[in-house]
Every structure is written in C-alpha cells, then in structure tokens.
Amino acid sequence: MLAITAGGFRFDARLEEEAAPRTIAVLRSLLPLSSHLVQARWSGESAWVPMGFELELDLAPENANSYPAAGELLLYPGGLSEVEILFPYGATCFASKMGQLAGNHFATIERGREQLPELGRAVLWEGAQDILLEEV
C-alpha cells in the first residue's frame, strides 16, 4: 500500500504489482518521496510531481496509459518530457508540450478518492502542494 499525503489530504493507493512489477521496483527505490504537486499544464484535470530530466530510471513502457481515470497514478520514465508522476484528479489526457504521452500506471487510489476534486481545486487555485509518498 502506498500512503500519500498531499496538501492537507491523505490517500491510500494500491500498488499495481502484477501489471507493473518493474515500475513498482523502480518506485520503491525512490521512496519515501517528498516533493511538490503542481497543476499539469497540458493534461487536463491532473497534477504532477516533476522529477527532472537528469533522473535515469532505465524503465520501458509497462501498463502504459494516456487516459488515466481520477486516482490512477502514472510514472513517466522520461524521454520526450522529464521524469514525473502524474496525479489525475479528474478527466485527463496525459500530454506535454511535445504532444501526447503514456505513463506507467503503477498505483490506484482506493481510500480518499472522494477528496480528489478538492485536491485538484487546491492545486489549481492555491498553487503547489507538498506531497509525500511512502510505502506502508
């Protein structure tokens, strides 16, 4: 289980162990991950955790998706855009200024899902929110 604290919100997400085992292994090497959740510019109702162009994850597409539902978290391993975690809170088409992207669906929020629209409003209207991801 992945515990996520974003702003004043708490979420629990199921790790997609069977569908994305390599992605989960890479993610575990990054945990605990403390960063900022920022409104996505090109992906609709979604926020993202920027992780930079310098990070080398050596990760191929796995359980990749361009249209995640609210609460379906994606890890983009870099390439056309920087490494990032996409955090959809509503209707999303994952994209960057280079065009449409696909990220590895690695976790699905199970507890706290009803708070996603509120988190989206906070990110959009109040700005970047602190975020912490840790395995429990």
Image (cartoon, rainbow, N blue to C red):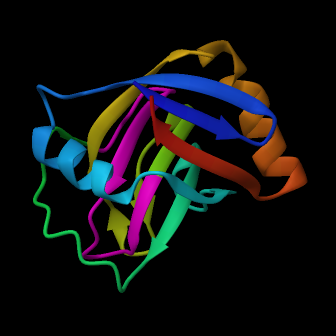
Quadrant that contains the N terminus: top left
Q: Is residue 98 above or below residue 74?
A: below
Q: Quadrant of residue 105?
A: top left
Q: Residue 71: x and y, percent?
A: 49, 27
Q: Residue 24: x and y, percent?
A: 23, 43
Q: Residue 134: x and y, percent?
A: 49, 41
Camera-side residue: 72 or 54? 54
Going 36% across and 74% down the picture, which residue do you hit? 81
Q: How many marks?
A: 0
Answer yes or no: is residue 102 visible: no
**118 sits to left or right of 111:** right
Quadrant that contains the C terminus: top left
Residue 135 lies in the magenta stretch: no
Camera-side residue: 39 or 21? 21
Answer yes or no: is residue 88 visible: yes
Q: Residue furthest right?
A: 126
Going 57% across and 35% down the picture, which residue do you hit? 4
Camera-side residue: 75 or 99? 75
> Which residues are drawn in magenta?
66-85
Going 66% across and 37% down the picture, which residue do you hit? 5
Going 13% across and 29% down the picture, which residue do you hit? 19
Q: Quadrant of residue 15?
A: top left
**62 sits to left or right of 27:** left
Residue 82 lies in the magenta stretch: yes
Q: Quadrant of residue 120?
A: top right
**7 sits to left or right of 65:** right
